[in-house]
Image (cartoon, rainbow, N blue to C red):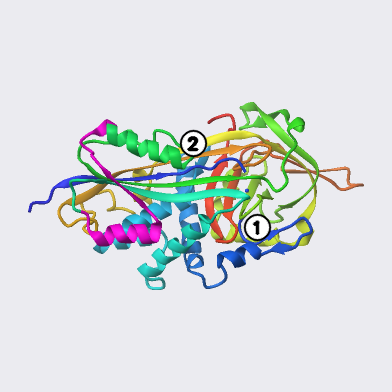
Amino acid sequence: MPLANRLLLLLAALLALSHGQLFPKHNGEGRTNSSHQQVLGTGEGCPSLKITHANTDFALRFYHLIASETSGKNIFFSPLSISAALAMLSLGARSHSQTQILEGLGFNLTELSESDIHRGFQHLLHNLNLPSHELEMHVGSALFLSHNLPFLPKFLNETMAFYESKLFHTDFRNIAGATQLINDHVKKETQGKIVDLVSELNTDTLMVLVNYVYFKALWEKPFIFSMTTPRNFYVDEDTTVQVPMMLQDEQNHWYLHDQYLPCSVLRMDYKGDATALFILPNQGKMKAVEEVLTPEMIMRWNNLLQKRNFYRKLELHFPKFSISGSYTVDEILPKLGFTDLFSPWANFSGITDKLNLQAPKSFHKATLDVNEVGTQATAATSFSVRFLSAQNNHRVLWFNRPFLVVIFSTSTQSILFLGKVVDPTKL
């Protein structure tokens, strides 16, 4: 049978809703709370920890590329959503295409087998989807399959076993109906936050892969609504906008002013299995901080913020806002080593052996809401840390200028969301 190109559409969608932890969490007295980690079975040697470093490395490589091409704009995405979707797609890839996907995700295949990678994602997704009365989190995948195409049972079985994917038989000849089916499913799974993810289907489409993350959590230390007031946010030297600025002036927080880098780092815990790090560069030093944003640096900040002497009373000014990110992933991934994935040379014969499938388009959307009861992003300040009145050592931290945000699952040590808030008034 002659080779016939058909479209394989890869979609990654995510949602971050208001509210936030990476690594062990401390309570108000500075003690580590590891009970959740024990329940989840995420101790040393567990399958999900084997993929943590690669996932973190991919997240930051993806961020650095976006940041280099979108200067002066907000950035927000879920690296976990993109990594899980690509790893799932690799189940149907063969030969060099499969190797390119897994190595592009940062995995060393001489040290970690393909089965270890998929078991790692299986364990990670299972733990993230465990029910919790404190935090809503749902990570999921869906395959929309043409009812006219004979898909290989091994591919379908493995996507369901490792990635808990749902299967939908779809009539792609009805473009409007197929588009609505996919968008309605994503909208439902993300509580209405991700809408119109798909808009470019055509009658050659044979499969659509969707991955989504829904996250909603409450601050461990919420802000008081009545203390929120309009304040200036300094986007750059020439642009100032007004944002609702939240205030806490009687709470202790985990934070530090880096002795070696021009930034301050604030750790804000959510109720449940999540934490956020907000990284506030000194005035005009965003690029300098971004250049050293590595897995090792994030680990360093996190380790420092486990130390009791960094848990201190702080007057915290923090913006209330919503931002979103939308990315055409197939234009980004080739620059990260995925050179053949979206080309006619891609080999997806593990999905079906009847046709030569091609993956020409990949979309990713993310949204983030931050308010008094919860958060997913933060703003910056003219002066990262001001020490007023040396007599009583009163510490004030203003997030009223551009800053970075990293949201973690504590027990799995996985980055759920990553971004940069440049202008909190730009949705």
Residue at x 46% of width, y 44% of height: 14
First along the sequence among labels 1 and 2: 2
Is residue 295 something that shows in the picture?
Answer: yes
Query: Label 1 crowding class (10 Å Cα cut-off): few <14, some 14-19, many 20+?
Result: some
- Residue on which disc 2 sits: 193
Residue at x 18% of width, y 49% of height: 149
| Mark 1 or mark 2, whichever is nearer to me | 2
Q: Can you say whether 17 is above or below 119 in the image?
A: above
Q: Give left or right: position of 101 versus 242.
A: left
Q: Give left or right: position of 173 versus 293.
A: left
The image's mark for residue 367 is none
**Does the magenta run of residues contain 171?**
yes
Is residue 73 something that shows in the picture?
Answer: no
Give the Cα distance between marks 1 and 2: 31 Å
Residue range (magenta)? 151-176
Residue 65 position within the rendered picture, expressed as x and y whole percent measured from the top left:
45, 47
Residue 67 position within the rendered picture, expressed as x and y whole percent measured from the top left:
49, 43
What kind of element bears circle 2? loop
Residue 143 position within the rendered picture, expressed as x and y whole percent measured from the top left:
32, 48
Q: Give left or right: position of 212 versus 393.
A: left
**Does the magenta run of residues contain 43?**
no
Amino acid bearing label 1: Trp
Q: Nearer the viewer, residue 64 or 93?
A: 93
Amino acid bearing label 2: Lys
Q: Residue furthest right?
A: 391
Picture quadrant where residue 197 is located:
top left
Residue at x 55% of width, y 51% of height: 291
Q: Marks 2 and 1: in contact by CB < 8 Å?
A: no
- Residue on which disc 1 sits: 301
Residue 44 position within the rendered picture, expressed as x and y whole percent measured from the top left:
56, 72
Residue at x 55% of width, y 68% of height: 41
Q: Nearer the viewer, residue 335 or 34?
A: 34
